[in-house]
Image: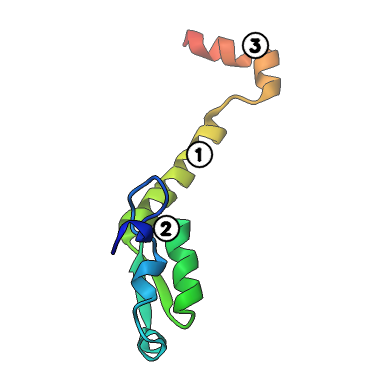
Amino acid sequence: MNGSDCCQNCGVPRPTAWWEPLPSEQREQIKAASMGMWAPYLNSTKKHVSGAEIVHDKFHVSKHLNEAVDQVRRSEHKPSESARSSGWSRNIEIF
């Protein structure tokens, strides 16, 4: 791969640079592609290997799941607006 095969300003290889050299007969035989969740990887794979099942590594799946659970936990932990205005949340901090 040369410099034109890299994403602009980031040095990461352009995802299409992996698919374009493969003849269409080989691309049609690909049944699954494992990758991270970066949009250019997903879009390039869907475009060049449309029949392949996309499989994400468990690190990225776990990361997104943990972030979602954390976001819900934080939103449920916040005292409601009515509790704040009534002084309930201030009184609970005394204990």
Between the residue at mark 2 and the residue at mark 3, the CA separation in whole angstroms equals 44 Å
Which residue is found at the position 36% from the left and 61% from the top?
5
Which x, y percent locates residue 58? 32, 60
Gap in Å between the C-alphas at discs 1 and 2? 19 Å
Judged by depth in the image, the label closer to the viewer, 3 or 1, is 1
> Residue under circle 3?
87
Q: Label 2 neighbourhood size at 10 Å, few (<14), some (14-19), many (20+)?
A: some
What amino acid type is highlighted by mark number 3? Gly
| x then y, percent, for residue 25 | 39, 91
Tag shown at residue 60: none
Residue type at numbered disc 1:
Gln
Q: Position of residue 90 (x, y in %)?
A: 57, 10
**Circle 2 residue:** 37
Q: Secondary structure at mark 2?
A: loop
Q: Nearer the viewer, mark 1 or mark 2?
A: 2
Taking the view exactly as shown, the residue that stands out farthest to the left is 1
Place of residue 32 in the rendered image (x, y in percent of width and height, measured from the top left): 37, 78
